[in-house]
Image (cartoon, rainbow, N blue to C red):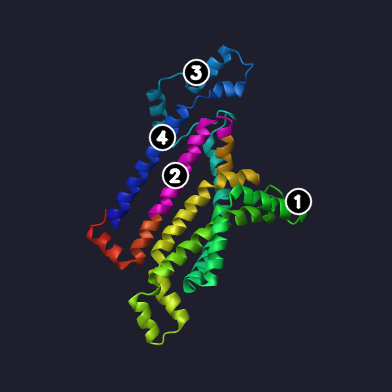
Amino acid sequence: MFKFVVNRLLYTVLVLIAVGFVIFTLLYLSPDNPAQFKLGNTASASDIEYLNHLWGLDRPYLVQLWDFMYHAFIRFDFGDSWQYSAPIWPELFSRIPRTLLINLLALLMNAPIGIFLGIFAGLHGGKWQDSVVMIICMILVSVPGFWLALMCISLFCVKLGWLPVFGIETWKGYVLPIITGALGGIAMNARQVRSAILEVFREDYITTARAKGVPEHTVTYSHMLPNALMPIITSFSGAIAHLIGGSAITENIFSIPGVGSYMLTASQTRDYPVVRATAVFMCAFTTLVMLVTDLVYGFIDPRIKAAYASGKRK
């Protein structure tokens, strides 16, 4: 197990370096000129040239790449924001708790509801109950998150006046971001759990348990669900990554000062150091979730744990 953890940590580091390389290269190849964007169309050529030199944009690609990779992954320093001339780390750290709070609460909301709906649909596979749950899930998956957020604002904020339109001054400001972030996860989890339940529904050990007169709720929660946990855990890890990745839209719509809105604002103002920092943070969080998921696999499935112990699993 220790060897596996070390290998996965090394893999995580390589993924972060690769993401840093790709993000930097894509932004470098962008046709936009950040200096001209900040100074405006009326800026003189000398002013633009000075700002390009100040930011190091007039240096060769490899020099800029090495400077970014060295400072980001060796010194853990993403530099200063071009737009605000302030260090990135303090601002990023102040925003991380808000993003994690909203997304973790959304996960705590969609996990039990999604599991319940998936179990309910799986136990009634092919019946009208299953069809109703799947139709609801298809609607929730198909509806764009930003449109759903806007409709919630129109109904609960503008027409009913129950919740604030934006901001997080009170707990009410967190309600709509959490709900809109959770609905898509509910649908994804319900579909995954349903598929897992249907897969084990007709297994021999389930038939044997029923033949022995084991109560149906015991069969479901003590036999079906534990054996269907693997795809469910995979679905949850994907849901966490999806929530973090989609936080830019949610936070921007509800004016929440989180990591997602920080990245979106930086991309709009061509603040490339902030874009790179937030992208690396989101990648680091996602790979950490995947690492935890792999470790949970080992504790749940004895076969995987044995493979870890023997060193056969790569």
Residue type pointed to by label 1: Val
Residue type pointed to by label 3: His
Query: Does the magenta segment cover residue 268?
Result: yes
Q: In the rendered view, would you say 232 is above or below 39?
A: below
> Is mark 2 in CB contact (under 8 Å) with mark 3?
no
Q: Earlier in the sequence, mark 2 or mark 3?
A: 3
Residue in the image at 44% along x and 56% along y: 237
Query: Does the magenta segment cover residue 160?
Result: no
Q: Earlier in the sequence, mark 2 or mark 1?
A: 1
Front: mark 4 or 2: 4
What is the number of the mark on residue 22? 4
- Write down the residue under mark 2: 283
Q: Quadrant of residue 82?
A: top right
Residue in the image at 50% along x and 24% along y: 31
Front: mark 4 or 1: 1
41, 69: nearer the viewer: 41
Residue type pointed to by label 2: Cys
How far is mark 2 from mark 3, CA to CA? 30 Å
Residue in the image at 47% along x and 34% along y: 78
Q: Residue furthest bottom?
A: 213
What percent of the width, then of the height, locates residue 225? 43, 71
How far is mark 3 from mark 4, CA to CA? 23 Å
Front: mark 3 or 4: 4
What is the number of the mark on residue 158? 1
Mark 1 Cα-neighbour bin, 10 Å: few <14, some 14–19, many ≥20 = some
Magenta-tinted stretch: 267-291
What percent of the width, then of the height, locates residue 210? 40, 83
How far is mark 2 from mark 1, CA to CA? 36 Å
- Write down the residue under mark 3: 53
75, 291: nearer the viewer: 291
* Majority secondary structure in the magenta region: helix
How far is mark 3 from mark 1, CA to CA? 48 Å
